[in-house]
Amino acid sequence: MSRFNLCRGDGGSLVLFINEKTWAKLCLEAPDGPGRMSIVMVVTRGESDDSYSTPVIGNSVYMKIAKIGPSFVFYTSADGKSWSMVRNFRLTTDTKGLRAGFSAQSPSGNGATVVFSDIHYAAKRVTDMYTGE
């Protein structure tokens, strides 16, 4: 779960990173400044695409990434129990050197404080792509 107070563009992300030209992020971001939170996803394969998804009520959300075969899937949840798929994508055919982590961003502000909590890793097979379970 990520939670924070924001300026425009501030956010907290789960990140998949291979190199500067191959990466992806699932981000809770304030695209329009304080008070309007959204799920934003970026997939970069040479060039980046931004995908704006569902608005978020409040200033926190649960986020999850799963790898299913050659694809990665991003999920969000308001309660950490009921998950919704927000993006399914292939990053690259060669995931050698893939790293996963967390990121905070503040492109137009004086910095953002991001708190990640309830962090879990599970090496398990996902049987339902739509819920990540």
Image: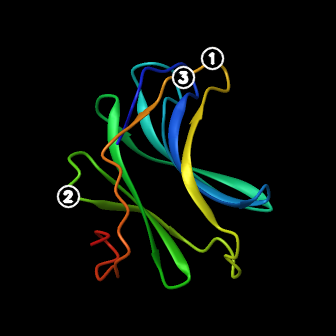
Q: Which residue is disc 3 drawn over?
A: 112
CA distance separating discs 1 and 2: 33 Å
Relative to 4, 51 lies left or right: right
Q: Position of residue 90 (x, y in %)?
A: 60, 74
Viewer-side label of 3, 1? 3
- SS for callout 3: loop
Q: Position of residue 19 (x, y in %)?
A: 77, 60
Q: Which residue is disc 2 drawn over?
A: 82
- Which sits earlier in the primary sequence, circle 1 or circle 2? 2
Looking at the image, which residue sits at the far top? 110
For the C terminus, the image quarter is bottom left
CA distance separating discs 2 and 3: 28 Å
- Is residue 44 shown to the viewer in this render? no
Neighbour tally class for label 3: few under 14, some 14-19, many 20 plus, Cα within 10 Å: some
- The amino acid type found where label 2 is placed reads Ser
For the N terminus, the image quarter is top left
Depth check, front residue: 75 or 4: 4
- The residue drawn where x is 33% and y is 79% is 126
30 is higher (above) or lower (below) than 96: above
- The amino acid type found where label 3 is placed reads Ala
CA distance separating discs 3 and 1: 7 Å
